[in-house]
Amino acid sequence: MRSLAARRWYSLGVFALLAAVILALYAILSFSIHPTSFASGWTLWGLILALAAYNVRKRLTFLPLGSSSKWLQVHIYGGLLSFVLFIVHVEFRVPSGAFELSLTLLYFIVFFSGLGGLAISRAIPARLTTRGEEVLFERIPKFTKRIRDDVENIVLGCISETQTTAIPEFYVEHLKHFFDGPRHFWQHLFQSSRPRNDLLGEIRSHERFLNKDERAAVQRIIDLICAKDDLDHQYALQWTLKVWLFAHIPFTYALVIFSVFHLVLAHAFAGGSE
């Protein structure tokens, strides 16, 4: 059984060979009187259909259609090969006409969202285990509310037990917004802990003005800040994993449909010119 590295090198080799064959055929046929656009167009459309079938395969897990990992590898390198076919089909130039430009834009949205999704699916799952406990995305709001309730109980307790308003005032001015919902999305996505450190630095700078009981309450709040920040980290990464599919898959189906219209129009105009 081949190792993961060996399988990747094998897949890259097959991709490079097929890409070279496509470019060589284009170079040869470009000197002939036969147009290459129909051959490259039909091949590209067939490849796009095959790539779109991967999403169908993921839903039909009960059928013996091969492992999902093999389908994924074919999907990745097939997607890269589609780019070679695409630039051959447009003959290395920017298409003219509103419909062709729209179709080109649609293809690039699908292609680059696929590349982005590949990077995301490789990087994010490993990062989900680096901070706090991994939580189901649908349960994050529930845990966020629980933490907010705990903090507010501590704050209200400070009023009744210590008869001071220092912590409640600090909560309203600096912490309430943080605990009300997911925060610092982009910072979590790009692994920046600056907002968390700034918030902890702010609360610790006020700590020296508090009495013993208030400091104990602040320490509990600090623990909850860290727990909430870990939840925000989970939210940002899991949301990104989920949302990119909502861009990639619908645009893929739109590309298939627009491509059908393109094929019909291309053959209609070709027949008319003859």
Image (cartoon, rainbow, N blue to C red):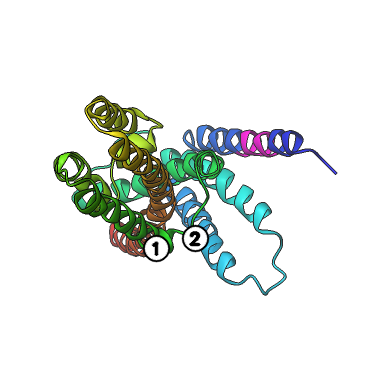
Residue range of the region highlighted in magenta in the rendering: 11-18
Q: Secondary structure at mark 2?
A: helix
Q: Nearer the viewer, residue 225 or 212?
A: 212
The image quarter containing residue 21 is top right
Q: Which residue is mark 1?
A: 253
Q: Which residue is mark 2?
A: 52
213 in relation to 194, above or below: below
For marks 1 and 2 on the same chain, the one whose residue lies earlier in the sequence: 2
Please say whether residue 33 is visible from this viewpoint: no
Q: Nearer the viewer, residue 139 or 38?
A: 139
> Quick check: 183 left or right of 5?
left
The image quarter containing residue 1 is top right
72 in relation to 94, above or below: below
Q: Could you say where residue 213 lies in the image, as x and y percent from the top left? A: 31, 40
For the residues bearing labels 1 and 2, Cβ distance under 8 angstroms: yes
Residues packed near mark 1 inside 10 Å, few (<14), some (14 to 19) or many (20 plus)? some
Q: Name the amino acid type tagged 1.
A: Tyr
Q: Main secondary structure of the magenta part?
A: helix
- Identified at 68% across, 53% down, the residue is 70
